[in-house]
Image: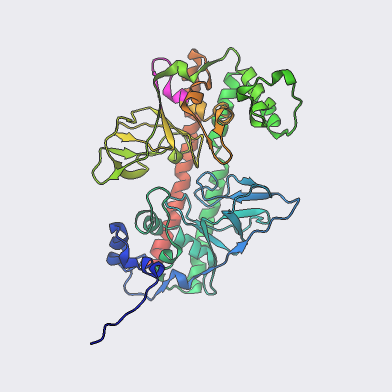
Amino acid sequence: MPLKQFTIDFQELAEDAFLRNDEKYHVFLNSSDWNLFNIKNKELVFLKDILVDDYNNFKYIDGEEYKGIPTGQTYLDEDGGIKEHQLITKEDHPDRLKYKISNDNILISSLRLAKSPALYFENENLSNYVFSNGFYIYKVKEGWNIKFVLYVLRTKRLRNILDKHIYRGIGISAYKDNDLKKIKIPLISKCKQDQIVAEIEPIEKNIKELKNKIAPVQKIINKVFSREFKFDLEKFEEFKKRKFFEVDFRDFNDYKMRCNFKSNNHLVKYLLKSLHGKSKSLKDFLKDGIISGDIPKYIEDGEYRVVKTINVNKNGFIEKFVDDKFVDKTNKKLEYRDILVTTHGEGRGKFGIYAYQDTATTDANCAMIKFDVNKINPLYLNYFFNSFFGKELFYYLESETKSVRYMKNEDMENMPIVFEKMKQQKIVDEIKIELDKQEEMNRKTETERNKIDKIIEESIIT
């Protein structure tokens, strides 16, 4: 019998689902056969038969201002609303911010642990928005209510699949478009879809009203600090809008003699002047110094878990074990009430306090601030870092190369900390009272979101 030969493209081989060696993927595949709601007695349809790719590249036009939306958690809220944007210029806009979208599109973040994996901007003016290539962009096929599909994509069931089963990678974890589209849901009549959406609309209205009552945490912290230290926050915000300043050549002995706006601007000088006599350096409060994290060596049954400041919650606290990977034992131990700061990469300048007794460590993008609790209240220090004082001073002190910005530990040690010992607890108490009120609003909002999830579950299963 003659020897038979064949050829195969390694790229095709790599796409074979059964060559994936991660257990989490095959648990979902084998236990459910990609059936999202585990329903056996209804006709099923693949998401690939509902979602149609709709990618349209952005073209820069001189004189226009464009608002870039990366996939990072700081730009979108839990309901897919836009919180912040990144200004795009002709000279420096990155290739990853490349897509224009319409009000007929559904976007899904390709990243694991997205606040809201599915986005839909029904009434938003999108003419100047540009979205990252980290989003999958679709239109919905005829016969499907776009908002019904949106709610299905936001269910806890689907988020669980994205965050725990089909993602790939250890560092930046994401999932592939073709894996998402293999998921199957029950085929439901358009009439029933419309009824479900109508039932959810009043709940969406309640969520919107509750969110309008929630003040940003940053605003609450800023208000308390500016009042207690008699700082003119309105004047400061006005300075932030100014683009040109007069500079005295005698002032050219400024920090590091950098020839850029950041290190020689009057905004920071106004800030530092206001701190005169009211501040000490961070190094005055340190006990064990500032310790940089390591590149983690992951093993199944390691000694420490890994946490990252990029995953702090709204109140500046580290979420418990946001990364469930284990690493080898290390002497760089994260301890109760240490403060973490992201010194490199996405979320740079984000601070969070570690409020758990469990053993943990952090990665190479972060540093641990270990301070003397007898000299400064850890909650006060954390709130300071998350105030306008901390944010602006971090930006001022960080170093940069042509392509990378980062904070050196020795520079952070010289960071001015606005400080009056007797005011620490008063400021902490004032902020806590206001944050508790906001937290109650957040709980009510989450209750409303859960109602939507329940309606979708019951409508599909029954």
Q: Residue furthest front?
A: 2
What residue is drawn where x is 45% and y is 40%?
310
Q: Is residue 370 left or right of residue 277?
A: left
Q: Which quarter of the picture shows residue 339?
A: top left
Nearest the eye: 55 or 294:
294
Res. 103 in view: no
Could you say where residue 459 lies in the image, as x and y percent from the top left?
Answer: 41, 66
Q: Considering only vertical position in the picture, is 361 above or below 177? A: above
Q: Is residue 300 left or right of residue 227?
A: left
Q: Considering only vertical position in the picture, is 17 above or below 278? A: below
Residue 380 on the magenta span = yes
Q: Considering only vertical position in the picture, is 333 above or below 208? A: above
Point out the image quarter for the C terminus.
bottom left
Residue 157 on the magenta span = no
Q: How many marks?
A: 0
Could you say where residue 315 lies in the image, as x and y percent from the top left?
Answer: 47, 34
Nearest the eye: 299 or 65:
299
What residue is drawn where x is 58% and y is 64%?
55
Point out the image quarter for the N terminus.
bottom left
Nearest the eye: 107 or 96:
96
Which residues are the magenta region?
Answer: 369-381
Nearest the eye: 462 or 370:
370
Res. 435 in view: yes
Q: Which quarter of the picture shows residue 376?
A: top left
Could you say where residue 145 lies in the image, as x and y percent from the top left?
Answer: 53, 68
What residue is drawn where x is 38% and y is 76%?
43
